[in-house]
Structures are given as C-alpha cells and as structure tokens.
Amino acid sequence: MKTIIEPFRIKVVEPIKMTTPAEREAALQKAGMNLFLIPAEDVLIDLLTDSGTGAMSSEQWAGVMRADESYAGAKSYYRFEARMCELTGFEHILPTHQGRASERILFELVGGKGKVVPNNNHFDTTRANIEHSGAEAVDLVVDEGKDPRNRAPFKGNLDVTKLERFFEEVGADRVPLVMITVTNNSGGGQPVSLQNIREVKEVCRKYDKPLFLDACRFAENAYFIKLREKGQGDRSVTSIVREMFELADGATISAKKDGIVNIGGVLLLRDDELYRQARNLLILTEGFPTYGGLAGRDLEAMAQGFEEVLHEDYLAYRLRSTEYLGEKLLAMGIQIVEPPGGHAIYIDAKEFCPPLPPERFPGHALACALYRHGGIRTCEIGSVMFGKAATMELVRMAIPRRVYTQSHVDYVVEVVGEVFDRRRTLRGMRIVSEPATLRHFTASFEEI
Ligand code: F0G
C-alpha cells in the first residue's frame, strides 16, 4: 500500500473554531500583531509548536485514572522508571517537569564561568541555561546543516573535525561535556546519524569527556536512521534507540515531544556522583525524586507515551505526514528547509517575500499573513527571534503529534499557496514596543 494512513481512529473530538476574516483581523490587531498573544480559541490550525500539544491515546488516559499519587515511591513512578530503563539502559533516572528543568539542574552542576559546551545546535533553552550558569554555548553543526537547499540525509550531524579543533583551541579542561541534539530542532529538525554519534563518542573518549544527548525527539531521529543510514534498514527502531542511548553518558529529555504527553521531562545520568548531586537539586526545586515536579498521572502517561512512540507504523506516519506537507509546498515553488525534518516544515521567508529585507521581518510578515488568510498559527524563527544574529528568515510549521488529519494538512497547503500567489502584497513590519530579552514572545508590531 502506498497510502500511509493515520494509524489511529478518533475517540474524542475537540471542536476547532472557524473565524471570519474580520474576526481574525480584530484578533491580530488586539494582539499587537504578535501571534503568541492571540488566544488559542481564535486559531483554526495551531502549528506554533509540537511541544506538549500531542494527543494522548486511550491507554495513556487509562493510565491517568490508574495513577498512584503517593508522595514517595508511587507505583506510577516505578512503572515510569522501568519503562525508561528498558528504553535507554540507564539506571539513574530522574523525572522533571519539562526539558528545561533537566537542563537547569545539569548545567547548575557542570556549567559555570569559564566553561564551554559544544553541541550541533543548542536549542534556545539549553543555550539560555548554559549561559545562565556563566558558561558559553558553541554550535558545531556540519556546514550542510546551514544550507536550506542541501538535501544531505543527516544535516543534524555534529562536525567531528570542528569538534577536534574546538578541543585544541578551548582546552579540554574547560569542556564539561559534549552535547548532541537529536533531532536538531534549531537546524530544521534534521537527524543525526548513528555513525556521527559513534564518532563524537570517540572524540569524547579521547578527551575523557561525557557525551550527553538532548533527546527530545529521539524516536523520530532513530526512524530517520532506519530509513536513511547504510546498514540500519533491517534493525528495529527499539534497538537503534537503545544504541543511541548506550553511546551516551547522560541525556536531557523533554517528554512533551516524543513522550507524547502534555507535560514532563527526564534527566538520565550514568555517573553515580553526578546523579547524587542532581537528585539533591531536584529535591530542592522540583520535588521528591519519585515525582520530580509531576503528578503520578503524568508519570503514567509518560511511561505509556515512551512505549507508543516506538511503534513503527506510528513513526512511518509521523515522518511521512510531515514530508507530505513539505513536498506539496516545494511542488508549488515554495522554498523550505530541505529535506523535510521530522517534526516541522520550515518555510524560507527570505525567498517567499523577496522585496522584504531582514529589518522588515519577512518571516513575521508571512506568519501574520498565514493567520490572517487562514487562521493558521506558525512561529517566526529569524530576525524577530534572534535580532541581528539571525542567519535565516524562517517560518516554522510544527506538527503536533496525532492531532491533525491529512485534510487539515491539505487545508494548510492551500492557505500557504494562496498567500504565495499574493506574496507581492505582503507588507513589512516595524516593532512598536519590545521587552529587554526574548522579545518575540511579547513585542508588538505594526505594518509599514
Ligand atoms: N531541547 C529541544 C531540542 C527542544 O526542542 C526543546 C523545546 C527543549 C529542549 C526544552 O524542552 O520545552 O520541555 O522545556 N522545544 C519546544 C519547541 C519549546 O517549540 O521547539 P521544554
């Protein structure tokens, strides 16, 4: 069969509201043309993020009811711990309320002034937590990862030559650990090959440094390895995932992605002493180590979600449906970051709106146009988010897990196509007011 269908049927539905163009215009004006400030109720298709926005299964909801809410040693914790141990092979497993809590604990312990942490590309919260500790975050992704048109299979790889040079220049004493983000969210959701993880691990061995994964989208990454990497096609995703984690000495995970839950995170550690220290910090700010800032029901949902995400019919559907959106846009002549990533399609807004220079925020103009025209919410990743440091002007369409059907995606394609036809009419934007940091969340804009 060529058609890859959604491998689930729908048991509970949540109505989404159609709005009129006048209603959307009013919502946009009221929000100061900032899509983060629009009430979700006024959004028809919400592609702002794939984080915490997935649909839970009937088994996950059953787990929610079954959950044990004991403060210490709850049954739900042991179920979660057993699942994570089976999945990853790790024995030191700490639940946290989300990915950035794991990052904060880790870098409070290993970061600090003078330290430097390399990664393929740090996600914003990882970078922010490293910098908050006083350390510096450095991106060492392979060069093809920076070219939207390059269709290399593993554009998320960390450049091993750059890593060697980095160790020589910075000095191993200043490097507490090496990180790899799978898949590479900041680089377009591109995967990292198993071969690359093995090579990075070799460099880590040479300098006696631990390798950590930022493993939010580990299952999507493993399925890309199965599809694309030589010699991996016959393996189960479960065994590829296991090898990825066995190569690592620790991992930070936001369960809001491949855990398919609405809240939750994990910190995995191999080192006994680091684990003891992390557990103490966890108690200080998150909660007792058998709940880590979560309810028992969240742990149940995570235990089940981390099992379901490895089902290969789910992963085939997941990656194919994202690719489907990307292919349709490319066929209309719309430049995206190629090849399509696992969790999102990124439109190249510089190509989409050629008359608009970066200082007129082409990505933001496009994101607002998609909302205005079809009620679709997306996220600018360009000059609004990064200011002058932006290297690309992208609009991310992140796909929540198991939420939208193919006809929703076809609608999105139609809206983007119609906005593309009238792209010459898109107006540039000016910032009216902005906060001191992270301006994209709360700044207000006007059209010029
Ligand atoms: N690492 C990566 C690669 C992420 O994509 C995220 C979150 C985090 C860490 C932090 O996890 O949100 O649970 O604290 N990414 C979301 C996104 C917010 O929209 O891409 P968190």
Image (tube, helix red, strand yellow):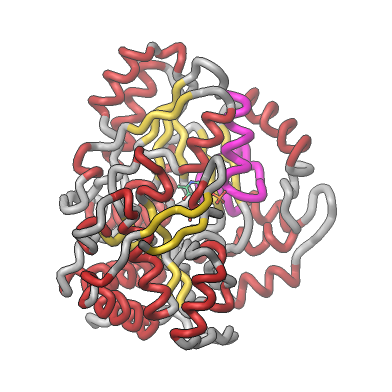
- Tell me if 171 is positioned left or right of 278 in this view: left
Q: Is residue 300 visible?
A: yes
Q: Which x, y percent locates residue 71?
A: 84, 51
Taking the image as shown, residue 305 lies to the left or right of residue 210, namely: right
Q: Position of residue 117 (x, y in %)?
A: 44, 26
Residue furthest front as drawn: 448
Q: Residue at x 45, y 35 (%)?
A: 248
Front-most of residues 200 and 19: 19
Q: Nearer the viewer, residue 385 or 333?
A: 385
Residue 320 inside the magenta-drawn segment: no
Q: In front here: 431 or 368?
A: 431
Is the N terminus in the top left, top right, bottom left or bottom right quadrant? Answer: bottom left
Q: Residue at x 22, y 63 (%)?
A: 352
- The image quarter containing residue 11 is bottom right
* Residue 193 appears in the rendering: no
Nearer-the-camera pick, 346 or 403: 346
Name above or below for residue 308 compared with residue 188. Answer: below
Please say if 355 is above or below 106. below
Whether the magenta-drawn stretch holds residue 109 is answered as yes
- Residue 412, horizontal then vertical, whole percent: 34, 78
Q: Which residues are magenta?
A: 83-110
Q: Quadrant of residue 316?
A: bottom left
* Count of labels in the image: 0
The quarter of the image holding the C terminus is bottom left
Report the predominant secondary structure element of the magenta stretch.
helix
Q: Residue at x 37, y 73 (%)?
A: 370
Indicate whether 354 appears above or below 131. below
- 406 up-or-down from 445: above or below: below
Image point (69%, 27%), residue name: 277
Among the 4 quarters of the image, the one containing residue 137:
top left
Q: Position of residue 107 (x, y in %)?
A: 57, 29
